[in-house]
Amino acid sequence: MAQDATPEDAGPELSSILGDLTKRAQTLLAELEVFKEHLRSIRLEATIEMAHFRGTVQSELNMLERLAQKEDANSASHIVRSSNLPFLETVWNSAKSSKNLTALQKRMYYDPSGPDADDTSTKKAIQNGRQRGKQRRLKAASTIVDAVADGGLSWTKVSLVTNTRLLFDLAKQGWECGASSDEDEDFPDDRSDDDRDVPILKTAKELASASRAMRIRTRHPKVTLVLPRIIPGVQGEIDKVLDDCRVAGVEVWCSADMPEAPAIRDAQSIMVPDPFSGFTDTLNIDCTILLAIVSEFSHAKVSKEPWFHKALKRQVEIEDNENLLPSLLYPAMGDRGLVCTQEACKRMREIVDTIGTASERARTTILMGDDDSKSREELVQEMQTWSAYEVPSTWQLPIRVVDQDENNCQRNLPGEAAHVIREQTDINRSVFLHGWAADRTTITSNRSVVKQLESELEQYIDLADAVWPKIWLCPTARSLVGREKRGAKKEDRKEGVWPMPDPLRREEQRRNGLDVLSIREGHEVEDLRPQGYATELAEVIAAKEASKRERFSP
């Protein structure tokens, strides 16, 4: 929405206004870059929808910079008066005052004929599954929400309409303007909605209708209409329109209601907090994460073997790009206590014993603290010998195995839990019910189970936040490398090239991992074990490499 008026824009004054707008656009763009860097630092850059908004700001800046080169003062004056920058600044300031921001300028699709009149019909439609299907099929209406916050539960719409403009819109609808605000006959309550269908009221009704047509975590989003240029209490006609907006179902903020926008560096950790900051002091580790922690994929550079199936080959590629442990799992675990259920531990050990390599079995022994004579520090140091990456000294090894009903915690489960979890396997019930009952953050990469639980819970209406289980879904998974099956296709090897036993392959993978980290960091990464796992192993590898060079040298 454009700026309605500016001072006279002739000559030097136009240049001054243009310079001020350009500087403000540059400041706004710089703040967006600071915010983007914050998102990158907490690994959420791809999850916050702001590319369109940033592109709009960049286009506005480009336009202002081009205007500075124009010789046509009249054309420049008109464009400056209609600059979209004040609107963009207001949207951004609203976003900086929000919590858990998820999107800027997001289009929301909804079914205007859907069950939005009362919660009873909405609940019925959601429970029988027709509501979502209807929204997907029709998408008959849409509206733009300028800032989506509170995980989707707070919608903000900005309009720079002024008192004067709103009076003009009312006049077009046949209102009598300028009369005393206490003359009720000038504002009869029995006027039809169409009589008051000015643009700002139409926007409020669209937003309210869209909000009632959808639920986020079982609740309707709350809509706030931000009108920083409206001064209430001056004209009764305007106050009546504002009241109608509120009756439609939106909260209205005028000039006096606007909070002062905080500095971006003060606001960014509230706008989008680090997801790990909300974790509980003790974490409940799912079997999928237990396997990821001990997997060869997670600790060294693994070469694609001809007997790898497609999923394993894909994991090699993913690990080369993201390094799961140092980039995600180590920061997620931090120095928090770690537990897993007996069922998760049993299943993990069964898998490791069946297909795990010697190194994966060794890491399992360390992770689960099979030797209870070793201290936490000793376990961390021992795990370091099996990894190409630095193992945090604060890592709380070993993982403690607990009963899923530890301390009779399942008596704390909400009534919805039994219904939601009913179709899960025994191991998944043990893991997710324990985290839910003990109020512990569950860490998992089992996307299908998490989505099933969320889908089941979303069948309810207006669940409190406290009812929902605390779950962090790791965006990527790791399985064990495993051992080559009998009869698997053998790799063609040149004469003189012989396969290394597991300890030697581990040392070579450790060195490859250091090379990858050095390239990524732009400098040589310190080798915490310069002598390798053992001096004799390093010597054997060196001899092997020398032998290969001699055999295949021209």
Image: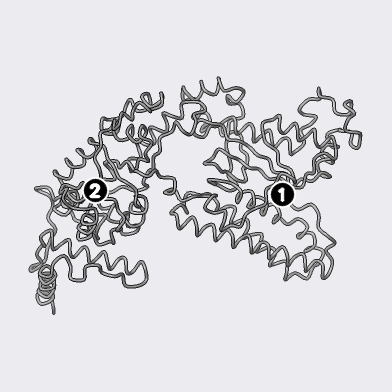
Residue that badge 2 annotates: 398
Q: Nearer the viewer, residue 260 or 169?
A: 260
Indicate the quadrant where residue 431 lies.
Answer: top left
On the picture, is 312 further left or further right than 71?
A: left
Can you give x and y, in whole percent of width and height, for residue 206 in the image?
66, 34
Q: Amino acid at mark 1?
A: Met
| Nearest to the observer: residue 434 or residue 108 | 434
Q: Does 523 sit left or right of 386 as displayed?
A: right
- Location of residue 342 in the rendering, given as x and y in whole percent from the top left corner: 22, 36
* Residue that badge 1 annotates: 1
> Circle 2 sits in a helix, a strand or a loop, which is it?
loop
Image quadrant of residue 546?
bottom left
- At horizontal 81% and vertical 22% (from top left) the residue drawn is 190
What residue appears at the point 79 percent right and 46 percent down from the top-left corner?
162
Q: Which mark is residue 228?
A: none
Q: How is the image coloured?
A: one colour
